[in-house]
Amino acid sequence: MELRSVAAVLAGLLLAPSSLTTAMAAPAPSSSAETVVVGLWEPDFRAETPAADCEGWRLDTQGFCTADDSRNGVELGVKFQTSRDLLITGIRVYRVDLATITGSLWAADGSLLATGRFAPTDTRNWQDLTFSRPVAVSPDRTYVASYYSPATKYAFQYDFFVDEQLTRGPVTALRAVEGDPNGVHCYDVAACRSFPRSPYRSSTYWVSPLWESPAGEPLPPPAAPGLPADVESPSVSTATPYGGATRVGTRASVKATFSEHVRAALLTRANVRLMRKGDPTPVRVRLRYDERRTRLVLDPARRLRRDATYRVLVSTRVADIAGNPLDQDPRKTSAQAAKWRFRTR
């Protein structure tokens, strides 16, 4: 465990030397006269899962399905976003592995932002880890809160994020969609190298980021699964070159601005394509997403052909934060891809 913790910290220093923080666990939520600590679940939350839903694994006395996987260690996490600038102060975990475990906060690219150790405990229960320094996170960017169990013992609930996101105050654990799952893990034997990114049945592993709320402010109610409030699909609101444009320069980039924030993980070359008429192979492009402006830029690897017609296609596999697929024409019964053409000079 010590070797693994040191390795994780060293990896974080290489990935994010200016922002990595470390800490030891606090046995209970920390607070001050000015603030209180908040997580997606309260420290007295009980899952009350039906035993049948554990599918052969054990149900403990607090209603959590628990696994003893008998492997060589696993990192288990949850993807989340915030609706405003926020300081993440630590990690909350429902403990099944009672020996020393490690908690971590990651950026979406796998950069380790903060890490620390939970002290051993005698009972299965919720426990908090407080980072030595809070970590500033920005709205509409994805982060991962996780913990590492060297004994591969953990609590879970299958299919938790299949159709639902989970919101408490400014923090939302994202609904799982195709190409951007939630409920993620990484076994020691896997190529993910500690960063949890592999899904299994959209499970929750009962891990939450922690943040502070003003003491005088009413706390948001404890999180409970529910259908996302946002049911509107995103669309491409403006495009450059616009549809039908002619005499476009051969060095031009293509820009698409979305009507709302979309998931950066879904903006891939499989979901966003630039095609030249008469050529079945997509033009090779570099994709850049400006989250603040909700604008995607396609930079062609080479100059465009002169006097040629190009088509841009943004697939309905692109989705917003709530998981709603892109729909360029909501008047039709099924989701419609965004498509437009332009011609070079």
Image (cartoon, helix red, strand yellow):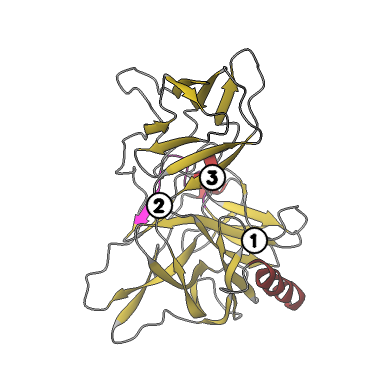
SS type, badge 1: strand
Residue 174, numbered circle: none
Q: Nearer the viewer, mark 2 or mark 1?
A: 2
Residue behind mark 2: 292
* Numbered label attached to residue 288: 3
Cα gap from disc 2 to disc 1, whole angstroms: 31 Å
- Residue 113 visible in image: yes
Q: Nearer the viewer, residue 91 or 149?
A: 91
Residue count near mark 2 (Cα–Cα under 10 Å), binned few <14, some 14–19, many ≥20: few
Say if 133 sits above or below 199 in the image.
Answer: below
Looking at the image, residue 86 sits to the left or right of residue 316; the answer is left
Range of residues picked out in magenta? 157-167
- For label 3, count other residues whose C-alpha is less than 10 Å away and answer few (under 14), some (14-19) or many (20+): some
Task: Provide the secondary structure element on which disc 2 rests.
Answer: loop
x, y percentage for residue 168?
A: 34, 59
Quarter of the N terminus within the rendering: bottom right
What secondary structure is found at the residue carrying circle 3? Answer: strand
Q: Tell me which numbered mark, 2 or 1, is placed earlier along the sequence.
A: 1
Please give the residue where the numbered disc 1 appears in the rendered image: 75
Tell which of 74 and 79 is nearer to you: 79
Amino acid, disc 1: Glu
Most common secondary structure along the magenta stretch? loop
> Mark 3: which amino acid?
Arg
Q: Are marks 2 and 3 in contact (CB under 8 Å)?
A: no
Residue 163: within the magenta? yes
Q: Quadrant of residue 244?
A: top left
Residue 19, relative to residue 236: is it above or below?
below
Q: Which residue lies at the image location 65% right of the left edge and 36% below the top edge? A: 301
Residue shown at 50%/54% (left/top)?
79
Residue 91 horizontal side relative to residue 5, left or right:
left
